[in-house]
Image (cartoon, helix red, strand yellow):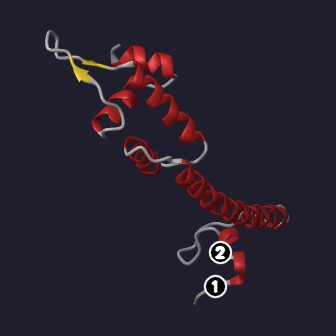
């Protein structure tokens, strides 16, 4: 099957198929009669695996390493567990940071509704933002 058909079957853009072929994640064969790349059923399965792994937060580097494990006859599952456990910790940290940011934004909105708009004066651009944290450097 050609890139467009593979893309349709896997639910991705044809450019994604071509890119994954270019970086070695898929292994198309070049058709001698028309120079088009043809993808196999194995490429379709690899593409579906890539999509599933990416939906869990795995990077292409992670996925490539899992493919390499499998090609050596080693289970990539231990790697998958280690990576996803690490990513979960990172994601939880990011969520906590975003919750702090959300609270700061809510506090700013509550405070700003009581304040008038100001005009830039050469020293000030937007007084609302400049008052956040109380840091005014003179």
- Residue 29 as seen in the image, left or right of residue 107: left
Q: Please provide percent x and percent y for residue 98.
A: 70, 61
- Residue 98 as seen in the image, left or right of residue 50: right
Residue marked by disc 2: 130
Q: Residue furthest left?
A: 32
Task: Give the structural element (helix, strand or loop) at label 2.
Answer: helix
Examine the image and state in which quarter residue 115 appears.
bottom right
**Residue shown at 28%/36% (left/top)?**
22
Distance of label 2 from label 1 (alpha carbons)? 7 Å
Residue marked by disc 1: 136
Chain-order first, disc 2 or disc 1 = 2
Q: Residue furthest front?
A: 73
- Mark 2 crowd level (few <14, some 14–19, many ≥20, 10 Å Cα): few
Q: Judge whether 49 appears above or below 10 on screen.
A: below
Image quadrant containing the N terminus: top left
Examine the image and state in which quarter residue 130 appears.
bottom right
Q: Are marks 2 and 1 in contact (CB under 8 Å)?
A: yes
**Residue shown at 14%/14% (left/top)?**
32
- Residue 10 as seen in the image, left or right of residue 133: left
- Give 138 or 32, whichever is nearer the viewer: 32
- Mark 1 crowd level (few <14, some 14–19, many ≥20, 10 Å Cα): few
Q: Residue furthest bottom?
A: 138
**Residue shown at 80%/64% (left/top)?**
103
**Residue shown at 77%/66% (left/top)?**
108
Task: Give the structural element (helix, strand or loop) at label 1.
Answer: loop
- Give 113 or 9, whichever is nearer the viewer: 9
Q: Judge whether 115 appears above or below 1 on screen.
A: below
């Amino acid at each position: 099957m050609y890139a467009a058909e593979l893309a349709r079957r896997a639910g991705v853009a044809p450019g994604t198929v071509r890119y994954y072929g270019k970086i070695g994640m898929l292994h198309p064969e070049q058709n001698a009669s028309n120079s088009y790349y043809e993808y196999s059923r194995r490429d379709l399965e690899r593409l579906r695996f890539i999509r599933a792994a990416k939906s869990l937060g795995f990077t292409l580097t992670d996925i490539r390493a899992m493919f390499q494990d499998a090609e050596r006859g080693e289970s990539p599952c231990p790697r998958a567990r280690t990576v996803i456990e690490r990513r979960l910790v990172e994601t939880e940290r990011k969520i906590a940071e975003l919750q702090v940011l959300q609270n700061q934004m809510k506090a700013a909105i509550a405070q700003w509704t009581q304040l008038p708009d100001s005009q830039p004066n050469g020293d000030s651009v937007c007084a609302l933002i400049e008052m956040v944290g109380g840091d005014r450097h003179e």
